[in-house]
Image: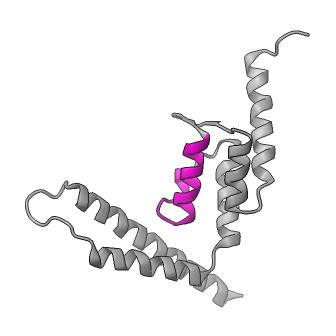
Amino acid sequence: MGMMPPQEKASNEKEGNESLINQATSFEDLAKIIETNNISIQGSQEVFTPDMLKNVIAKIQSREWPLNAATSRDGFCTKVTELLQTESNVDTLKQTLGDVENKLMTESYVQGASTDHPLNRRRDERLKWKERLQQDIQKMETESDEK
């Protein structure tokens, strides 16, 4: 038995990963599949290790990161998008939005000349997160009105 050429091995691995990823029916399920099968995905710029992939799932699920944070390789982004649509409901998003707004009101940030302060960067991220949540809620409410 000869060794497979590297490109053939890579394509078989990709198909295997994609097939496994497609089996997921929830975010927990996807994280478990990635961990159990030790799935890493070669992105366009870096290799996403199982821990990195699970972190991406958690951040996207909480709407902290946008969908484009998920690599499109091996059907990963497609599956995450599908799970997000399945799991998303307006009430959950409104609850998360409330949490983000509460953090924005209660956390400190630095005013004055130094705007590139870690607390300000965190606040800017939360403001972007809040905006994404508001857009998602508006889109979902519009879609449900059209039905």
Q: Main secondary structure of the magenta part?
A: helix
Residue 107 placement, left or right of 42: left
Image-based side of 28 in relation to 56, left or right: right
Judged from this view, the residue extending furthest toward the top is 2
Which color scheme is applied?
Answer: one colour
Which residue lies most toward the bottom here? 145
Q: Which residue range is magenta in the image?
A: 50-69
Percent position of residue 63, x then y: 51, 66
Q: Residue at x 62, y 42 (%)?
A: 50
The quarter of the picture where the N terminus appears is: top right
Magenta residue check for 68: yes
At which x and y percent is residue 12? Answer: 80, 30
> How many numbered marks appear?
0
Give x and y (percent) for residue 137.
53, 80
Snapshot quadrant of residue 146: bottom right
User: Which residue lies most toward the right here?
Assistant: 1
Q: Quadrant of the C terminus?
A: bottom right
Q: Residue at x 54, y 51 (%)?
A: 55
Q: Quadrant of residue 141?
A: bottom right
| Closest to the observer, 102 or 12 | 102
Report whether 78 appears left or right of 120: right
**As drawn, 142 above or below 68:** below
For the residue pair 99 and 136, the one nearer the viewer reads as: 99
Q: Is residue 26 left or right of residue 141?
A: right
Queried whether the magenta region covers residue 44, the answer comes back as no
* Residue farthest to the left, as pictured: 113
> Looking at the image, which residue is at 41% across and 72% down?
131
Residue at (80%, 38%) from the top-left corner? 16
